[in-house]
Image (cartoon, coloured by chain):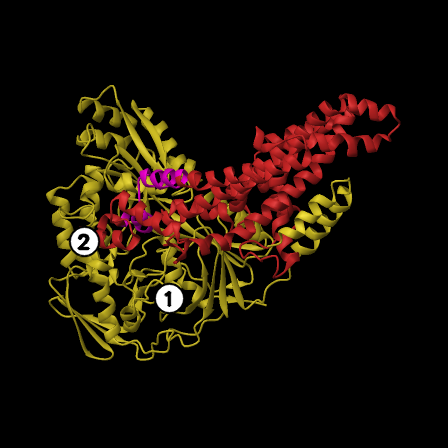
Amino acid sequence: MGQSFFTTSASGTFRGKSLVSTVALAALIGTAVLTAPASAATLRMAWSQDATGLDPHKQTAFSSIRLLELIYEPLVRLDSELKIIPALAQSWEFTEDGKTLTFKLDPEAKFQNGDKVTSADVKASFERLMAEETGAAARANFLSIESIGTPDETTAVFNLSQPDVPILTAMTSINAAVVPVSEIEAGSIGTKAIGSGPFKLEKWEPNAKEVLSANKDWAGGTVAVDGIDISVLPDETAILAALRTRQVDFALINDPLVATLVPNEASLTLNRTPVLNYHVLQLNPSRSPMTELGVRQAISCAIDRQDVLDTALLGEGEVSGPLTMPAYASDPSQLFCYERDVEKAKQLLADAGHAEGFSATVIAATGEPPTAAAEAQVIQSQLAEIGIKLDIKMMELNVYVDTWLKGDFDMAVALNGGRADPYSMYNRYWTKDGNLQKVANYIDDTLDDLMQKGRVETDPDKRREIFGAFEKHLAEVSPWIWLYTSYSYTAQQKNVDGFVATPTGSLFGLSTVTVAQ
Amino acid sequence: MNYLTRRLVTFPLVMLGVSILVFISIRLVPGDAITAMLGTEAGLLTPDQRAALEAYFGIDQGWLVQYGRWLTGAMQGDLGISVTYGKPVLDVILERFPLTLELALLSMAIALLVGLPAGVFAATRNERPSDLIVRVFAMIGQSTPNFVVGLLIIFILSVGFGVLPVMGAFTPFFVDPLQNLGQLILPAITLGFAFAASVTRIARSAMLDVLSEDYVRTARSKGVPALSVIWRHALPNALIPVVTLSGVEFGYLLGGAVIVEQIFALPGLGRMVLDAILQRDYALVQGSVLFIALNFMIVNLIVDLTYVMLDPRIRLGDR
């Protein structure tokens, strides 16, 4: 396309007409860059990482979930304070023994193909999620489901094999989305996106753009914009430039270094929300000398968490213990060695027989998070003070994930996903049969006991007490060194209003956004 | 044409070699389509779940079986299905290619428009201040990485002037030529900057050689006007190294300009290949690298044929 146009101009100007063509080029830029603003009722949005697929049960990457949350709906969802609120279900209740969970569906709820959302869809969706051939990683959170009853069209009854309080929180994930039974039977989940959510996916060009239109029949309310046009701009400084020139109304920003530049622009607003995800230095307690409690504790005492945060993330975050959800978080200064103490670190190291220090390798993923390399470097310099020599190995994300899953590292700089419920967040690591025990490589009876108790306890105050003890113990035995949580960022023009961010980083709040003319 | 047939016969052999190399190297890198999709959540999969996903991504068989299956398809023109795009690989490539081709042509046009006159000009002003200025600019152009140029352009335009071409949604040339050129001109300038610098340097030194030859002196002594000596007598003979350089550069550009596409958010081949590698979309990586290799071979062939046109003394088949 267009090649003939340019070959002519190239060969035709061999004889020194370059000045004329330069003027022509300049005129082209002049006319083409001054584009008229798009119709204001469509929100023009940009993000740097695109979704990798459309199957809500299978996709676990944040970049996919953010898109799918606009199209599909779970039974329940989390509000900005992480309280469970209705989505497709209007109400729900656990029986006294905690083994039966009943949902009443919104009778108005409809899929984007016009079909009503019924209990049959709920049953089929969860059965698909649980079937091993689906390959849904989220299945691990729903293993206690024994059967699903559908006494009538709007009632779904989950029969559980044991009391499972965290299951309700797990159901807020878009990985537990309700999809139409007809689409499951047609085998088209993942190729067509037919949900019941506020937006319909009109067009998707992977890694380039998405076009969403407002779902007029959405039972959850009225969507204020006509639609959302999402552009994938892989370089976040280019996103900032697009915001500056008003090409984009709303943007998602990952890199704190870019986000901190937004407030310099008078026409832009930055939304900054603390998130549940946590930055952590994972030690591998199966490898010597991290097998020794004293060594792990020495590392914990030698690290100045606030300094890592200030240097690598420009202070964009909060020092945190293992529990990052506000309802469970404790004062981090009460946790083991959250105040840096180099003398104590040296002493602990000497007592463990490593007074001279040792060498170890730390792995980190390039660009994931964007600050990973800087974090590794600050940690390297802090640990050098007690004689631990770190060799930093930066890896492409996929290589990192592969290495991480095999537990093939001495230490790892990581940004791990947080959950609204402490059990769902940590059972994969800190229970005896946790799926990721081979990555965590540390478990003791106390941790396992507390996790099992927390799982079945229904009283909120008692749960807080149990998980408080869990957190305190975890920080003390230091298999990992929890550092801090950071923020999620969105930037918007001043005429965009009504976006509500949540600690899960969801963009569902776009359903209430308005764009003033 | 004997030479042409011989060259064309080598194409399939080179392609076969390239396909084997790509096939193996992408699989040697740790991580697969499953870890690319799930990240660390892949650790939650049961062995049966993992097996189901491997079958879904077509990576459940041994390498030899996978390669055999792929090769059989490729020979029938079926490069497989991209798991990211859910479409045939060839369709995905052909959707992205027009942009890449247009960008490559545009950058080459800029490079030749600026580089050739500048090189010739510098050669005729050999060792004078104006020659020195051109050479300094060429040196700067060649040694500045294109991401610096690209980011500087974006920064200056957006901060200084508050304007920027539309980013993200790309407009094809035939839909809206003006919008299309507006989107491509800055990336083309970014790429053309270093390209023009190389052309300037090569053109200058080739012209210097030619200008000192006997036939140029003869032409001058016969009273041919100076401009005519330069443009009609000398330049055509100085073009061969320029064609060689442009051919190689153009071949590279047809493989996509990853960094510039990334900065200007252009959906070209380069970013497609990069994303395919990051997402371990094996079929797409294999198909697109093969496509790029084929382009490169075609461009090289055209370059060789151009030599004959420029200098009738060259007989390709006899060498």
Which residue is the site of mark 1?
A: A192
Name the mark on residue A161: none
Chain whose colour in the figure is yellow: A
In this view, the residue in front, B32 or B288, is B288
Q: Position of residue A365 (x, y in %)?
A: 36, 39
Residue drawn 21% across the image and 52% down it: B51
Question: Does the stretch in magenta take in A431?
Answer: no
Q: Amino acid at mark 1?
A: Lys
Q: Outermost residue toward the top?
A: A356
**Quarter-of-image position of residue A351:** top left
Looking at the image, residue A181 lies above or below residue A329: below
Looking at the image, residue A348 lies above or below residue B251: above
Which residue is the site of mark 2?
A: B48
Residue drawn 36% across the image and 63% down it: A191
Chain whose colour in the figure is red: B
Q: Position of residue B114 (x, y in %)?
A: 70, 38
- In what element is the residue under mark 2? helix
